[in-house]
Amino acid sequence: MDMITPEHLVRQTDIDERETAEWIDALKSVLATSGPERARFLLSQLAAAARDAGLKWRDARITPYVNTIRAKDEPPYPGGSDALEIEERIAGILRWNALAMVVRANRAYGELGGHIASYASAADLFEVGFNHFFRARSADFGGDLVYFQPHSAPGIYARAFLEGRLDEANLAHYRQEISARRAGTQGLSSYPHPWLMPDFWQFPTGSMGIGPISAIYQARFMRYLEHRGLMAQQPRKVWGVFGDGEMDEPESLAALSLASREKLDNLVFVINCNLQRLDGPVRGNGHIIDELETLFGGAGWNVIKLLWGSDWDPLFAQDAQGELVDALNRTVDGQLQTFAANDGPFNREHFFGQTPGLQAIGAMLTDDEIDRLKRGGHDLRKIHAAYHAAVNHRGQPTVILAQTKKGFGMGKAGQGRMTTHQQKKLELSDLLEFRDRFRLPLSDEQVERLAFYKPAPDSKEMRHLQARREALGGQLPARVDSRIALPVPPVASYAGFAIDADHKEMSTTMALVRMMGGLLKDPGLGSHVVPIVADEARTFGMANLFRQVGIYSAQGQLYQPEDIGSILYYREAKDGQILEEGITEAGAISSWTAAATSYAVHGLPMLPFYIYYSMFGFQRIGDLIWAAADQRSRGFLIGATSGRTTLGGEGLQHQDGSSHLVAATIPNCVSYDPAYAYELAVIVDEGMQRMLQRNEDVFYYVTVTNENEAQPSMPPGAREGILRGMHCVQRCEQADVRLLAAGPLLKEALSAATLLEGIFEVKTEVWSVTSFSELARDGVACERARRLQHDGDEPWVTRQLRGSDAPVLAVSDYVRAVPESIRACVPARYVTLGTDGFGRSDTRASLRDFFEVDAKWITYAALAELYAGRKTADEMRDIAARLELDLDKPIPTSV
Ligand SMILES: Cc1ncc(C[n+]2csc(CCOP(=O)(O)OP(=O)(O)O)c2C)c(N)n1
């Protein structure tokens, strides 16, 4: 075999063994007489001397392929003398029930899917957590938070079954959530989904990479709440159990340095290194564990390698020449997988057979013992030692790199096999072997029909399992919606300036920031507001908040800021309120989600506003927003510098013309594209009422722009229309044409109305559309009610536009699909204009001409509709010439 081993781990020829021994003896003697501190000091002095001498030596990040914690440093296993044995039996039962759940579902319906092999590898890692570490939330303790590896969900259900939280009917409806309802029971979702199982799951992790980054920002958000005095300081932990393949996702590693920079010792990652992903080995030709050791260690984490079980200890003890460690260093993951998939004789020949020294070590074991040699992640005692070290480590987050076997115990057909990830069927012989391996008291017949197994209530297993959970404060995972209402201040107190704007010039961004400033000062709500930015606070005119509420920093401010003399100086503080995340939209949205779900996760409602470049929201981090929706987030996402033609200058990658299209696809996302500051005030007020007062599981997406405008005061009676999605801003009896315009293009529509009336004598009515998506949703709901119940109102759009045949023309600074979404509800001829195509850098005026959405193009489009069949092409060309429009310009989507 051609192995790849880090250079420093390759055994080199020792040209002077006596000298080497002297150095090592000297170190040992310092350790024995003066202790580890002194030994560390001396080593760092040596390293400095080597550097000075130009040796270019530096400590390698990769340690040998053995456990970090030495056998003699392992603490005793807690829980009583037979705890280990009982817990092993429990893990076996859980493995069986999880397997039975998946195989049964797929016997009945081959299309349902599910996974066996992942939990089979992770079961022991979970069990030590459940029996000894994961503490539940109770009256006086906030509880630990656990992010579960998603495709291990069957194992978590299996445990909830033994604990009495789920019954057989639930298990029988794994991945059959809809049919379960019909059968009068609750089904089990494929992966952790709080939206689908709101009393059970807390964190959605099904999309790889989202769990790790969310867990890090959750741990950081807990510190934020503590430092701001909003939450009691308690030794709570955030645990994240993730796959080694999952670590390839950019999000998985994106926030590692934040975790160490902020010294998040409330965070423990357990990476289930079964060395396989879906298609094959994670790093066939290397060691994923070593790679992760370098990455996490380099990022400043405390790294614990948990590679080999207790039965390896005597083998290492015999390895005086280091041949065994050498062989392990050299054996790449693809080969380790092959060893996992094969039996004792194969491993004796191909692993222990490599050298005479190894043969001698192998000779200490029977073939069966070799076959059963455990990897560290399957040895409860070793796992406990690692977790114990992790929770007691201070000043750094910890990662435990736990080596396991994928499909552990699944026999020849499953364990370590290339195809094991998707295996959902097992032959009877494999099932029987599984039963025997885990010593399950099941008859052949029970095995064949995949009977779920639950020991008697007074059995040792059940008593132990219940007692351990009681000692750890109760059951977990559990999501609790505390339904605490926060006081919402009257809109006049923070947005009076917007309601009675009286044509003052401002952009909607300025209005939003001013409203936030007001909310932050509110005595009841203020401390719950969480402003979040990803290095764009100045762009959005938020610098005044730096001074007002400070930027959160766990260390306070260790420097004198350059602008200390200014009234808006850059103030960092331990109790700062703004989360300034730097250039990471993924990080900022993770913070937002932590704040937006704090009402359920911590029983402490918060009100986050994450303000960002709208293009870098749904487009860049849409999946994280989708997960936030699953998690029942409540808060405001503010898409600033929005609108394809309204953000002048910035060009193709910055100008957003699609976020409203995506927002509309998220059922609990309420989105608005307001034109006026007063509309924004009404939307923010209603959003707070719904989320904070009425405890509705919705969140708001609101776009604001940086275009200054003379802001009118709010006309009486406008509130309902604003919230439903449209209200009339320029009424015209007997109008010839009706213009619907959204957000920044309302101004263009109003100018178009002036042109139409002034030059072409066309009577024009103008509506502000605050939300095409809310109008469309209402339309769909009304249409369905009429179809199914033969009852119900007309959609709001229809009611507003009824009673006239005058054509309706809609214009949006987003793609046409946005205004198109209400077509079915418009009771007249309907034409839409939008901004399909790539943006580019130029002035707003040029962009709106380019996309054919400015006042002149709206005018022309309205006339074309009105004059259809009545004017010749030449006459229309004359009109275009009057408007100075180029009818021969290329279509914007082609250039
Ligand atoms: C973003 C994303 N991409 C792809 C998948 C599909 N998927 C689910 S599990 C899996 C393999 C996971 O491998 P690993 O993280 O090593 O976990 P293991 O099952 O081996 O424990 C893949 C590709 C997903 N769930 N999410």
Image: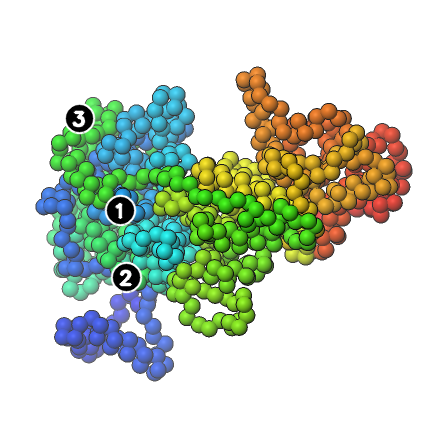
Using the image, determine if residue 179 lies above or below residue 856: above
Distance from Cα at disc 3 to Cα at disc 1? 45 Å
Report whether 530 appears left or right of 652: left
Residue where numbered disc 2 is placed: 394
- In the image, 98 versus 563, the foreground residue is 563
Q: Which mark is residue 140?
A: 1
Q: Would you say 195 lies left or right of 438 here?
A: right
Q: Is residue 338 visible?
A: no
Q: Earlier in the sequence, mark 3 or mark 1?
A: 1
How many numbered circles does the render carry? 3
Q: Position of residue 432 (x, y in %)?
A: 21, 31
Given this view, does label 2 or label 1 mark the residue nearer the observer?
1
Q: Which quarter of the figure has residue 782?
A: top right
Q: Residue at x 68, y 53 (%)?
A: 504
Q: Report the disc number at residue 443.
A: 3
Foreground label between 2 and 3? 2
Whether residue 729 can be seen here: yes
Q: Quadrant of residue 600?
A: top left
Q: Amino acid at mark 1?
A: Asp
Secondary structure category for the residue under label 3: loop
Q: How is the image coloured?
A: rainbow
Callout 3: 10 Å neighbours few (<14), some, many (20+)? few
Residue 481: x, y in percent?
37, 38
**Crowding at mark 1 (Cα within 10 Å: few <14, some 14-19, many 20+):** few
**Image: 778 above or below 385:** above
Separation of disc 2 and disc 1 at Cα?
A: 23 Å
Judging from the image, what secondary structure is the residue with disc 2 in?
Answer: loop
Farthest residue, direction bottom:
53
Q: Position of residue 353 (x, y in %)?
A: 20, 54
For marks 2 and 3, the one nearer the N-term is 2
Q: Distance of mark 2 from mark 3, alpha carbons?
A: 49 Å
Which residue lies most toward the top here?
790
